[in-house]
Amino acid sequence: MTSRPPHVAEDAPPADHSPPRQVPLPRGTGLVTSIGPGLVLAMTFLGTGDLVSSSVSGASYGYALLWTLVLSLIARTFIISSIAKYTLMNRHGDTQILDGFARITPVLPGIMAVVVLIAGFVTQATFVLAAAIGLHQLTGGEWGGDWGRFMCALVLVVFTLGLVALKRQFVVLEYMARIASVAMIAAFVYALTQIGTFDIGGFVQGLAFEIPEEEATSAFAPIVIASATIGTIAGNMPNLLYSGFMRDKGWVGPRYRKLQQFDLIAGMAPLLLINLLFWIVAAEFTAANPGFSIEDEYDLSEMLSVSVGPLGPYLLWACIFFAAMTSFPSQSRGFSQLAINGINHSVPAFRTYLGRDEQNPAFRWIQALVFIVLPLVSTLPGAPNLISLNIVGTALSTVLSLPIIVIGILLLTSSKKHMQGYAVNRVWQVIILGILGIIALVVGAEIATNLPDMFRTAFGG
């Protein structure tokens, strides 16, 4: 059985007390400033996984796969809420979800630490590439030759290293997330007004659960696009970061459940709106330009250039830059928290750091090297393009983590052994998590089956 620091067990709340009085929601401007972890998490999803997946789906199949977006966002919100419920309302005083996974089986945190190190690195490589491309294009796009984006990435890595050294880095990340969400909504609303069309009938019809026939204009099969959308949005590894963001905010214990639920909804609402705008703009443009497909980030630029005019590409590069730069620093911290927590559970010499994971000296090294500096390789000349790296990286992350996450959360939150009596899942919650668990296994198997073809398509092998 995994050991715990004595203070964790001593501080754990009594097992059978009634639900505590909730921290009241602030009023006025305090309501806005209280929103933090959910929006920071939402922006990590946007940079640039949702942007790419939603745009590729809309451009490739119009509104036919729109149901995957809606279903995935609902599933994502439910899964993240369940993760938050465990870390706020468990019997043991655990504040990280991997603490709970260790109670299922002691080997699980170590497995997840390896998954986080691999999939987190690929995710961070995608983000730094996206941010570098955005910055390079915003500054002219011609200078530096093949090394231009690498030099931009180097500047962004230095900036990120400085940011994560700040004592109040989470506050900075909150403000960056708010600015980025407003900027992206404004940019794509403007793009949609310039296109001037919106097929409401097609939009509604796209909510039907249908998989279209494969189109010659798409580089990826519809089931791959659907799986990538579901994997990007519904339940892949970044969902686990919410517990760490809540702890950074100071939300520890069941009194914060109501505030956390409001925060999560407030973060997911702009995420839904932004994803819909990405999808609608791509679908409407492709409908007016038959044969158009998105195979790299420059196709996205061409789409906005034709539909919006000279300002279009700048809007795209600004959105890509903001989306990636609100993700890269925050996920470097979140992934490091998860990885070091799993390592502390798995390495006997490090178990004294449980409950205070970030005091492990390895935390800063993992954050700086694995999740900030090493991802620079994705910006070297000859590296894969942004679309390919995102699709394959998302698929890899999903197949490694999605089934473990959903099934683990189901087992933890449905058990009186682990949850406060008033917080144990009700029957309908067990059913929903069970259905999501089945979907996770099916999606994971589908992605695993298509992964070789996906690599060949993406990397030209």
Image: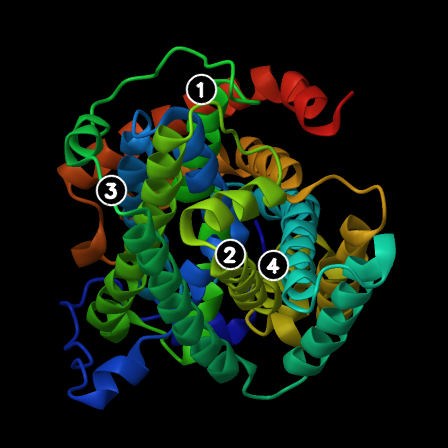
Q: Amino acid at mark 4?
A: Phe
The numbered dot on residue 222 is 1
Residue at x-position 40% and y-position 80%: 250
Q: How far is mark 3 from mark 2, CA to CA?
A: 19 Å
Foreground disc of the pair 3, 1: 3
Is residue 217 positioned above or below 371 on the image? above
- Numbered disc 1: secondary structure: helix
Which residue bears the numbered disc 4?
335
Depth order, front residue of 53/105: 53
Across and down, in percent, residue 450 comes to: 58, 17
Which residue bears the numbered disc 3?
197
Q: Amino acid at mark 3?
A: Thr
Across and down, in percent, residue 86 comes to: 34, 56
- Numbered disc 2: secondary structure: helix
- Residue 281 can be seen, yes or no: yes
Decide if residue 375 is on the left or right side of residue 266: right
The numbered dot on residue 316 is 2
Q: Amino acid at mark 2?
A: Leu
Q: Of the residues under marks 1 and 4, which one precedes in the sequence?
A: 1
Depth order, front residue of 104/407: 407
Foreground disc of the pair 4, 2: 2
Residue at x-position 58% and y-position 42%: 108
